[in-house]
Image (tube, rainbow, N blue to C red):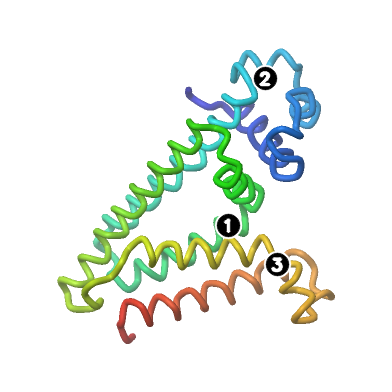
Amino acid sequence: MVLTEKHRHILLKAEELFAVRGFDGATVRDIADAAGVNLAMISYYFGSKEKLMEALFRERMTLMRIRLETLIMDDNYTPIQKVDILIDEYVNKVIQQQSFYKIMLCEQVINNNPLVLKMLRELKLSYANLVGVLIEAGQKQKIFKKDIDVMFLLNTMTGTVTQMVINKEYYKEYNNYKKLNAADFNELLRTKLSAHVKLVFKAILGYEQ
C-alpha cells in the first residue's frame, strides 16, 4: 500500500488511541472520530482495524530498517561514530514516538496478532544482522572486542531506553524534576539516556575514545 498524507493522519490518530486504550479498547469509530474522517473511509483505506494496526507497524518498521541500512553503509563515519549515532537516533525515536513503542511492547506481551509479531521478528533479525555488520567492521579494525553477543547488546539498549521512557514519570518524581515542562524534561531524558547507553556500550565493546 502506498500511504498518502490522509493514510498517515489516520494511522497517527489510531496510534495515539491504541497507546492509551489498547487495541481492543479503541474502536474503529473512535479512530474515525479522532481523525475527523468518515467511518467508511477507514474500511476503504485499510479494510479492518487489524489491517490498520498492521499498516502502522509496517510504516514505522520500514522506516527504521531503511535508516539503519543507510547508517551502516555510510563510509563517512567510523564504527564508533556509527554506534553513537545509532544510540542517539534510537533514543530520539523512542521519545518522539512514545505511543508506538508502548503499542509494540503491549503487542509482544499480549501476543494476539500473528502478522504483527511476524513483522516484529523480521525487524529484530534484520536490525541485529545490520548491527552485526557494524560490530564486525569494528572488530576487523581492532576497535571492538571479539565475542560480542549482538542480541544481548541490542536488548541492553532497547530494554533500557523503552523502560525508562515508559516509566519516565517515576524518574521525574524520584529526581524532583516536576517543575520542568514536558519539552525540557524530554530533552533532559534524551541527553541522560544517550549518555548512559553509550557508557554501557563502551564497556561492552571495549573501546576508548
The answer to which quarter of the image holds residue 200 is: bottom left
Q: Where is residue 5? Give x, y as percent.
A: 60, 30
Residue found at the far bottom of this picture: 208
- Residue 168 is labelled as 3
Residues under labels 1 and 3: Cα distance?
12 Å
Question: Disc 1 marks which amino acid?
Answer: Val
Q: Considering depth in this image, is 77 or 41 the residue closer to the camera?
A: 41
Q: Where is residue 105? Give x, y as percent.
A: 59, 50
**Vertical placement of residue 49 versus 105, above or below:** above
Q: Nearer the viewer, mark 1 or mark 3?
A: 3
The answer to which quarter of the image holds residue 119 is: top left
Tell me the residue that label 1 is attached to. Answer: 94
Question: Disc 3 marks which amino acid?
Answer: Lys
Query: Of callouts 1 and 3, which one flags the residue occurring earlier in the amino acid sequence?
Result: 1
Question: Disc 2 marks which amino acid?
Answer: Ile
Q: Are marks 2 and 1 in contact (CB under 8 Å)?
A: no
**Vertical placement of residue 189 versus 203, above or below:** above
Tell me the residue that label 2 is attached to. Answer: 42
On the picture, is 47 further left or further right than 208?
Answer: right
The quarter of the rendered structure image containing the C terminus is bottom left
Q: Nearer the viewer, mark 3 or mark 2?
A: 3
Residue at 21% from the left image edge and 65% from the top image edge: 136
Q: Are marks 3 and 2 in contact (CB under 8 Å)?
A: no
Residue at 32% from the left image edge and 77% from the top image edge: 205
